[in-house]
Image (cartoon, grey):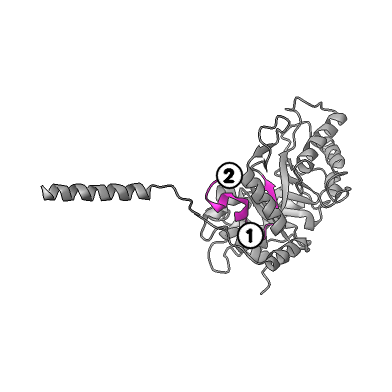
Amino acid sequence: MKFYQFLALCLLVIVAGCVKQTTPQAVDIQKPFTYSDQYYQNLRDYKKSDHEITYGWFADYSQTFSIGYHFIGLPDSLDICSLWGGIPSLRKNDPKDSVTSYNPVAYNEMIQVRTQKGVKMVVPVITRMQALKWTKLTDDGIKAYGDYLMGMVFDNDLDGLDCDYEPEGDWLQGDNFVKLIQYIGQSLGPKSKNPQKLLIVDFYSQAPPAAVEPYVNYFVRQSYNATSDATLQSQYNTVAAYCPTKKFIVTENIGDNWQNGGVAFTQANGNNKTKAGTQLYSLEGMARWEPATGRKGGWGGFYMQRDYNLDPPYKNFRRCIQIVNPSVK
């Protein structure tokens, strides 16, 4: 009998211990590094200097424990963040707001990174008009569409607009696209009344018209799966007649190629190895490449957040940043 009494007592102790262990507690899974005020001031000053920039399309930001899907997890030296995951905001259930998503965590982090680290936040939009039902395919329609695009920037106090020029037969191409950029260029970009606001055109196979160049800060080439310096030079040659080298940015699709940081890459001198003797991949190849006639504007990647999955986080982006713009010792 004593044995069974002792066994029952043991079971009560075990159960009590289990209940205690399942009590919910707040746990910090990951904490970002914090630095001195001087560090962040130096970082902001660096962003304002004349240098090859780092550009990234960022998506999948949400309320998760992984810092890899948070703005505060982005590399400190990132210059421009294109909000491929949408515009986070503090506005909830606003019937007048169809362009932002209620996400206070992402919004507050975005503001923190922008203010503290000097990362510029731009709105990416695939610029096409034929499918729109609220505007006409006319000059007035172009202005209405331009106002809509600029509203995304000004209504959300962002740093600029990333116009994705992939018309694929859409009416908004050629001269019509020029009219759009000229109109937006009055309010955004280097010739505007708000020159601190960026006007960017990114593209894939169809080069944007030459006439947009004066109004644009950067042309971002989707150089996905480029295997060599020769490929990058050929891509630049398609716009070289009107695009200064310092306005030209090359980018890799990290979303598909995050494990290695791109595809196997060969430099103009035949080298296909990193300084460590390993295979050279295209993100690093793009960081190292320069046009034949001058310094490029920068380099970057699409779905850049997937590079966070490596060890250490953002392994390829951080290495490439140091290659292009080494830290001052």
In reply to whether residue 174 is colored magenta, the answer given is no
Side of 33 where 100 appears, left or right: right
Nearer the viewer's eye, disc 1 or disc 2? 2
Residue drawn where x is 56% and y is 53% of the image: 67
Task: Tell which circle, 1 or 2, labels the residue nearer the N-terminal end.
Answer: 2
Q: Position of residue 88 (x, y in %)?
A: 66, 42
Front-lying residue, 7 or 45 = 7
Magenta residues, as a range? 62-83
Using a 10 Å C-alpha cutoff, classify the residue at mark 2 as few (fewer than 14 neighbours), some (14 to 19) or many (20 or more). some
| In the image, residue 175 above or below residue 218 | above
Q: State which quadrant residue 300 falls in.
A: bottom right
Q: Position of residue 115 (x, y in %)?
A: 72, 55
Disc 1: which residue: 285
| In the image, residue 329 above or below residue 104 | below
The amino acid marked with disc number 2 is: Ser
Q: Residue furthest bottom?
A: 329
Residue drawn where x is 64% and y is 57% of the image: 228
Disc 2: which residue: 62
The amino acid marked with disc number 1 is: Gly
Using a 10 Å C-alpha cutoff, classify the residue at mark 1 as few (fewer than 14 neighbours), some (14 to 19) or many (20 or more). many
Count the marks: how many? 2
| In the image, residue 21 above or below residue 53 | above
Q: Residue furthest left?
A: 1
Q: Position of residue 23 (x, y in %)?
A: 40, 47
